[in-house]
Amino acid sequence: MDSLQTKQFRKNEQISLKIEDLTEEGAGVGKVDGFPFFVKDTVPGDVVVASVTRVKKNYAFARLVQIVQPSRDRVDARCPVAKSCGGCQLQELSYERQLFFKENKVRNHLIRIGGFEAEEVDARMHRVIGMEKPFRYRNKAQVPFATDKDGRLICGFYAGRTHAVIRMQDCAIGIAENEQILKTIRSYAERFHIPAYNEQTGKGILWHVLIRKGFHTGQIMVCLVVHRKEKTSPPHQDQLITELVKIKGMTSISLNYNREQTNVIMGETGKTIWGRDVIEDTLLDLRFLISPLSFYQINPVQTEVLYKTVISCAALQGDETVWDLYCGIGTISLALAAAMRDRKNEGGRVFGIEVVEQAVRDARENAQANDIQNVTFYEGKAEELLPKLKGKELPPPDLIVVDPPRKGCAQETLQTMLEAEPGRIIYVSCDSSTLARDLRILVDGGYRLQLVQPVDMFPQTVHVECIALIQRVKS
């Protein structure tokens, strides 16, 4: 685009345009004389008036002023702060169109980043699996507390790309109990003058509240993250406990101590002040013990869909060796080990590797709780442990499962996977761009793309989970 053309647009100038697409972050995209504008809070099909906020050489940003004609895919957001809160980017887009957006996002990444032919992607990629009820699905909330400009205690979620707390009474994608729990804690803090922690000054006490619920058990955990010395308690904590235990399902109340001046939410130490140290939940008939620091999938309904797909792709007979890399608290490892155990063939075993010490402890406890003995967990970085264990404690794998963080697999891990030459690799991804990047490396190393299955784990947001199955085609 000629830079001369950008000069016709000035800051605060009002423009009219039709929104044609969405960015990967969920902002609307429309064009004026072929020049693209990004407009937040719009959906494809909207005809809008917007005010120019920033002009770059090849694109510009604008703020929504008026919706002249709403899209047929526009819906009313269930949450009154959906536009200001950074949690949900797509609440005003129909769920059917959300699924289309996510499916297209995965497809585009595989073609553009992974370099796969469109025909191959269309042949191998299945339709995204959505939810029947795409609200109230989150089993976990981490809610910051703050003081507003009038000195009042508030709680809510951060505005997008900031640490400004947006006041919130309820969250449409969280559990219904969140509202009562947060109201109880806020009332307690106001009554006994317990200040919110201020990240800028380093002063205050109440920082975050962590809420978790086991969807199958109904058990609820509340953990207050406080900026205090270890083993000390907030004033009058018994008054808080008395009110919280009235909430149905309350099982565990604890404190987590975070003395660091940081934006990391949880500290490393804590104590239980009422009830159990953990809550329990079940996935695929397996019991899982969940502590405040445990990693556990936040959408249990879709997690079962995800894991059933993994088990189906694995097609285990019961005598295979499986490596599960980035295994977390062992949810996939245990599901696969149980599937092999049920086959009643001898010799099958799963080896899980995870870098987080607490997660490995949880994984071992979960194996014991389910009496699963054909699984072994190791603590450490996959890229460092695999070369040391391969051929010694780790037998050659028939199947490798990877479920890495958003940044994808380390290059050393991918290389070790290729050197191990498993017959199949199942890649579970929460970021389809890094999935596409890593799949290209693995396919170039001697594998063929067999299946791609997107799963909508995070309705109302731009995020999508994805499973890819690749099969070895040469030795």
Image: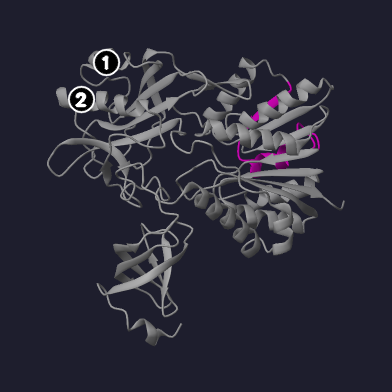
For numbered disc 1, what is the local secondary structure? helix
Secondary structure at numbered mark 2: helix
Type of amino acid at the residue the image marks with label 1: Glu
Kindly tell me whether residue 131 is visible in this rendering. yes
Q: Nearer the viewer, residue 307 or 319?
A: 307
Kindly identify which numbered label has been placed on residue 243: 1
Q: In terms of image quadrants, where is residue 205? A: top left
Please provide the residue range marked out in magenta.
Answer: 374-396
Q: Nearer the viewer, residue 316 or 381?
A: 316
Q: Is residue 169 left or right of residue 362?
A: left
Spatial CA distance of label 2 from label 1 is 10 Å
Above or below for 50 versus 293: below
Label 1 neighbour load within 10 Å: few <14, some 14-19, many 20+? few
For label 2, the residue is 187
Residue at horizontal 41%, vertical 16%? 249
Q: Mark 2: give few (<14), some (14-19) or many (20+) Cα within 10 Å.
A: few
Residue 14 in percent (x, y) is at 27, 73
Can the viewer see residue 390 in this picture?
Answer: no
Residue 424 part of the magenta segment: no
